[in-house]
Amino acid sequence: MKSKAAIFEAIGKPLIVDEIEVDDPGPGECLVKLEATGLCHTEIWYMGGGDNVDYEQLSPRILGHEGGGVVVKCGAGVTSLQEGDHVVPLYISECGTCPECRDPNTNLCSYLDDKGYYEGAMLDGRPRFRWRGRSAYHFMGTSTFSQYTVVPEVALAKIRPDAPLNRVCLLGCAITTGVGAALWTARVRPGDSVAVFGCGPIGLNVVQGARLALAEKIIAVDLKPERLQKAKELGATHLIDARKHGGNATAAVKSLTGGGADFIFEATGNTHVMRQAFEAVRYGGGKCVLIGVAKTGEEVSLVPRMLIAGRQLTGTAFGGCKGRTQLPWLVNWYMDGRLKIDALVTKEIPLTQINEAFAWMKQDQGYRYIVRYDM
């Protein structure tokens, strides 16, 4: 099947918008026609060299991991999905049977990982994409920068058919990561105090998660007033402009919370801010959750006595969300009006504008851009 796609070919170069060939799904796989895909900073990181590995060994490659679409064909053995089902691809699968899936305390899944799936091919060792006579590799198990993509059954969340795919596609990463970090990783409780360091697309959704959890005090910390105002729109009760505190809001958060917040979330990826966030959590059980991804090789230094005093430090992946089970809940909350998605959409664009949108994101313009494949 022919499909329009944006293809990664070399580090530092723009994506190539072209037509590719997509094979039929193999056993346990589904062919999905995507209506829309969100753009995430993960792709910017990858296209810029990522972890300094030789990514061109996996070139050409179809990037993208925030998609919403419809199943058009099922491979042999698929039982939980059928043609016509609306789905969101998941970069963390949920097989339901591995040790991690059976553990209620983690959303990780080892089924695909153990089989080398995330090395750019499907479980039989072959990609399902071809471009200009060559194989094109998969990315994060989703490859949503192609209108047609092939995804394992265990990495597709079935959602209600009346939800707009050009909105709920964003649940494939940013929104779920932020909201889930509050609800499922930290498990914020009614009446708790929460502070969020960094109010970009992830941090703003932590604010939403804290609101949904009925936190009493939700403190948004950022260097940009416009982001702080967006945080207020999404549920923040207090705003701290870190510029007014020399770039370090630790003391301001402790002052607002009487010694430290119950939960602190770091969503910048800056290791200095990570330490500031940890130091702003209360002793005796307060928890700091790191969401931002630091540059390769960077380290965070901590004072050991702060851990001895009962402060906790942890990280999160996809907000602790078990994708096939819990992501549909978020779709319901959006449809019920409890979860805000529209407020985070900066612009919808055709695939031909994908490189322009990434340039806007690098300039820190807006929150989320959505590619519509029907534009």
Image (tube, helix red, strand yellow):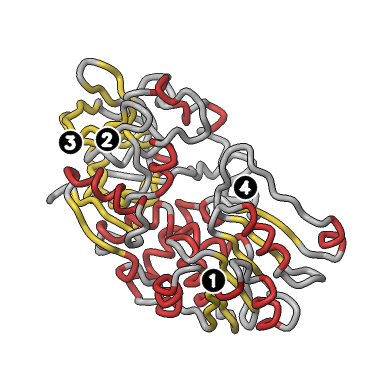
For residue 243, the mark is 1
Q: Give how far apart the Cα atoms at labels 4 and 1 are.
A: 45 Å
**Of helix, strand and loop, which one carries label 2?**
loop
Which amino acid type is shown beneath numbered disc 2?
A: Leu
Which amino acid type is shown beneath numbered disc 3?
A: Lys
Label 4 sits on residue: 102
Q: Say if residue 129 shows up in the picture.
A: yes
Q: Give how far apart the Cα atoms at labels 3 and 1 are.
A: 44 Å
Q: Work out whether mark 3 precedes mark 2 in sequence or the reverse, and give the earlier one.
A: 3
Q: Give how far apart the Cα atoms at labels 3 and 2 are.
A: 12 Å
| Residue in front for this viewpoint, 243 or 199 | 243
Which amino acid type is shown beneath numbered disc 4?
A: Arg
Q: Does residue 221 sit above or below 346 in this rendering?
A: below
Give the image location of residue 151, x and y in percent: 36, 37
- Looking at the rendered image, the quarter that the N terminus falls into is top left
Label 2 sits on residue: 15
**Of helix, strand and loop, which one carries label 3?**
strand
For residue 4, the mark is 3
Q: Is residue 191 left or right of residue 335?
A: right
